Image (spheres, rainbow, N blue to C red):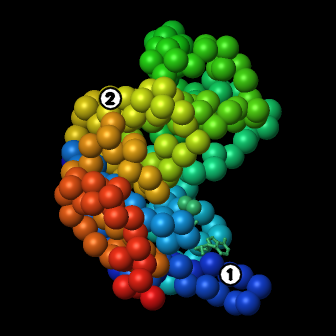
C-alpha cells in the first residue's frame, strides 16, 4: 500500500532577481498500482516537481504538502525519502566520481533496507538486472555515470529501480535522448517494475512516444507550474495530435 499525495504544492527558486515562483499549486494523487504521466511543454515546471519531491535543496517549498501514506515527505531528509519507498530518477543524473556502480548500488540498497544484502545473491541480482537491460556486466566496476552515454545512464536508472524496489517511482524524462531500441529496453524495465507489485509510477515526459510502451492510467497536462488538464490515456493521443498550444495560450 502506498499513496503519494501532492496538495497545492508551491515552489520557488532563488534567482539573481529574487525568488521566482515555479510551481503554482500542484495537486496530484498517485495510488499504488497506478501509472500517471505528466506531460507538458519545456519550462512548465515538470523537473521542478520531480526535484521538489526528491528534496533538492535549491527548491524552496513555499506552500502545500507532499505525503506518502499520510507521512510528511517534505520533512524527510533525502535518505529518509528513499527509505520510505520513494525512487527519484533525475533528468540529468549526476556523476559520482570514485564510486563504482557496484558499490553505489550496494550502498543504496543497504541504506534502504537497513542491512547489507547477502553478497552471493546480491552479485547474482545485480548481474541479472544488468543483463535484463542489456548492460555489459563490466559496467559494475565503472564509476557511476562517468562517461556513460545518455542511454547507459537511463539503463543504469532501471537497474537501480529494479534492485532498490521502491513503492513509488518518479521518472523524469526517462525517454530523453534514447534511440528506439534503448527506449524499448528502458520501457520494458519500467513495465517489469510495475508488474512486480502494486507500484506507483509518476512518469514525466515532454514527448508522447514513451507512452506507446508504458501505458499510463492517467495523463496530466502540466503548463505554467500547474496541472491544466487531466484525463485517461486518450489525452496523450490528443496531445500528440494537437500539441500544447491550446493550454499554453489559455495559461497566458
Ligand atoms: P521542465 O522540466 O518542464 O522543462 P523546469 O522545472 O526545468 O521545467 O523549469 C521550469 C521553469 O523554472 C523554467 O522557466 C526554468 O528556467 C525555471 N527554473 C528551474 N530551476 C531553476 C533554477 N534553479 N533557477 C532559476 N530558474 C529555474
Ligand atoms: Mg526541460
Ligand atoms: Mg524537465
Which residue is tagged 2? 192
Residue that extends furthest to the right in the rendered view of this protein: 98
Dot 1 beta carbon under 8 Å from ligand 1? yes
At a point 59% along the width and 33% down the height, the residue shown is: 151
Q: Secondary structure at mark 1?
A: strand
Please tell me in which quarter of the rendered image ligand 2 is found. bottom right
Which residue is tagged 1? 14
Front residue of this view, candidates 34 and 241: 241
Q: How far across and down, in percent of the image, does residue 73 sit?
A: 42, 64
Tags 2 and 1 in contact by the CB under 8 Å rule?
no
Residue 122 falls left or right of residue 95: left
At a point 39% along the width and 64% down the height, the residue shown is: 243
Residue 155 falls left or right of residue 218: right
Q: How far across and down, in percent of the image, does residue 252 sit?
A: 45, 88
Front residue of this view, candidates 114 and 108: 108
| In this view, 132 is above or below 200 | above
Tally of marks: 2
Find residue 67 and name its label: none
Dot 2 beta carbon under 8 Å from ligand 3? no
Amino acid at each position: 500500500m502506498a499513496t503519494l499525495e501532492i496538495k497545492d504544492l508551491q515552489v520557488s527558486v532563488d534567482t539573481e532577481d529574487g525568488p521566482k515562483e515555479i510551481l503554482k499549486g500542484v495537486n496530484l494523487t498517485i495510488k499504488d498500482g497506478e501509472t500517471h504521466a505528466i506531460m507538458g511543454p519545456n519550462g512548465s515546471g515538470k523537473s521542478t516537481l520531480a526535484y521538489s519531491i526528491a528534496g533538492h535543496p535549491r527548491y524552496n517549498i513555499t506552500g502545500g504538502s507532499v505525503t506518502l501514506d499520510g507521512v510528511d515527505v517534505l520533512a524527510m531528509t533525502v535518505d529518509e525519502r528513499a527509505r520510505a519507498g520513494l525512487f527519484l530518477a533525475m533528468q540529468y543524473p549526476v556523476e559520482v566520481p570514485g564510486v563504482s556502480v557496484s558499490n553505489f548500488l550496494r550502498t543504496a540498497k543497504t541504506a534502504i533496507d537497513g542491512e547489507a544484502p547477502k553478497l552471493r545473491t546480491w552479485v547474482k541480482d545485480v548481474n541479472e538486472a544488468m543483463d535484463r537491460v542489456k548492460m555489459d556486466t563490466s559496467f559494475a566496476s565503472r564509476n557511476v555515470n562517468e562517461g556513460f552515454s545518455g542511454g547507459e545512464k537511463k539503463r543504469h536508472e532501471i537497474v537501480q529501480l529494479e534492485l532498490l524496489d521502491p513503492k513509488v517511482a518518479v521518472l523524469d524524462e526517462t525517454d530523453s535522448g534514447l534511440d528506439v531500441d534503448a527506449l524499448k529496453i528502458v520501457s520494458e524495465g519500467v513495465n517489469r517494475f510495475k508488474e512486480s507489485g502494486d507500484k506507483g509510477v509518476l512518469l514525466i515526459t515532454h514527448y508522447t512516444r514513451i507512452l506507446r510502451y508504458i501505458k499510463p492510467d492517467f495523463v496530466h497536462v502540466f503548463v505554467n507550474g500547474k496541472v491544466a488538464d487531466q484525463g485517461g490515456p486518450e489525452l496523450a493521443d490528443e496531445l500528440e495530435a494537437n500539441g500544447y498550444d491550446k493550454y499554453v495560450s489559455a495559461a497566458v
